[in-house]
Image: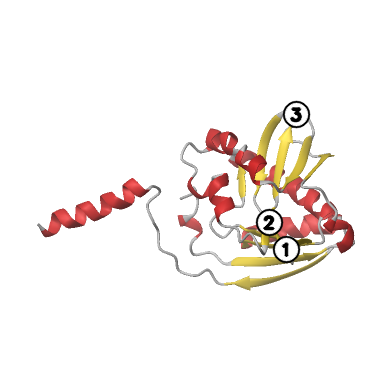
Amino acid sequence: MPDGMDNRSGEQTFEWLLDCTNNLQASQLQPSVVSEAVPQQLSARSKPLTASIVSTAAKIQDLTAFVRSLAPDPGMLAPHFFLASLLPRSLRPCVVVVSQGRNVAGLLYARERLVAGIPTGIVYGDDTLGTMIVARPEETESVLQCALETLLKHKAALRLRVASDRLAFLQVQTAKVNAEIHSHREERHAHLELPRTYAEFLATFRRKIARFE
């Protein structure tokens, strides 16, 4: 499981709904990949970040090498795991790829609601298990900021489920674009901690069987 998941199990999450002033019909006409420069930097000497919204499975799978460069055993952070979690008839992938020059700096995994196969411009992101953002720890906030700025410009609404310690950050981002924000507190549900790999899962059963012999 991703680092930091266990120590967040007792926290509460916020479901964050942002209604933008973007025209919904215009958002439906957005192509599967949208690229733009965002005046945000990871450091004083770095190049400006750019953000691309990717909605095709093939391009998302191409991000596997980047994810593995940060986590050799990515688990639920892997692009194929994210794609497998989608319901094809009601959701399509909406992944924001944040880059610095030619190098990928981070990702934000999200989903866009479909109605009768038509994109609505309503985007959902869930960070309950710490799997919404893929970036180096010191770059997470910059990547998140760049990704949110891009989504706010190109989508009609965002609905994010995040830890309560991110709420202040989100409020600052929405204030920049004069968008309406609604939030409510939601209790974390109990969850079962599972091993990271199937081999580790089988090993737990082997130990229990050995004890009964």
In this orientation, which residue lies closer to the viewer: 172 or 85? 85
Q: Is residue 212 left or right of residue 196?
A: left
Label 2 – label 3 distance at C-alpha = 27 Å
Q: Is residue 185 above or below residue 53?
A: below
Question: Residue 22 lies in what quarter of the image?
Answer: bottom right
Q: Position of residue 42 (x, y in %)?
A: 72, 35
For disc 1, the marked residue is: 114
Label 3 – label 1 distance at C-alpha = 32 Å
Q: Secondary structure at mark 2?
A: strand
Q: Is residue 195 left or right of residue 38?
A: left
Q: Earlier in the sequence, mark 3 or mark 1?
A: 3
Q: Is residue 28 left or right of residue 5?
A: right
Q: Which mark is residue 92?
A: 2
Which residue shows up at 67% across the image and 61% down it? 91
For disc 3, the marked residue is: 101
Q: Which mark is residue 134?
A: none
Q: Are circles 1 and 2 on residues that touch, CB within 8 Å?
A: yes
Residue type at numbered disc 3: Gly
Q: Is residue 186 above or below residue 140?
A: below
Q: Earlier in the sequence, mark 2 or mark 3?
A: 2
Q: Earlier in the sequence, mark 1 or mark 2?
A: 2
Q: Quadrant of the C terminus?
A: bottom left
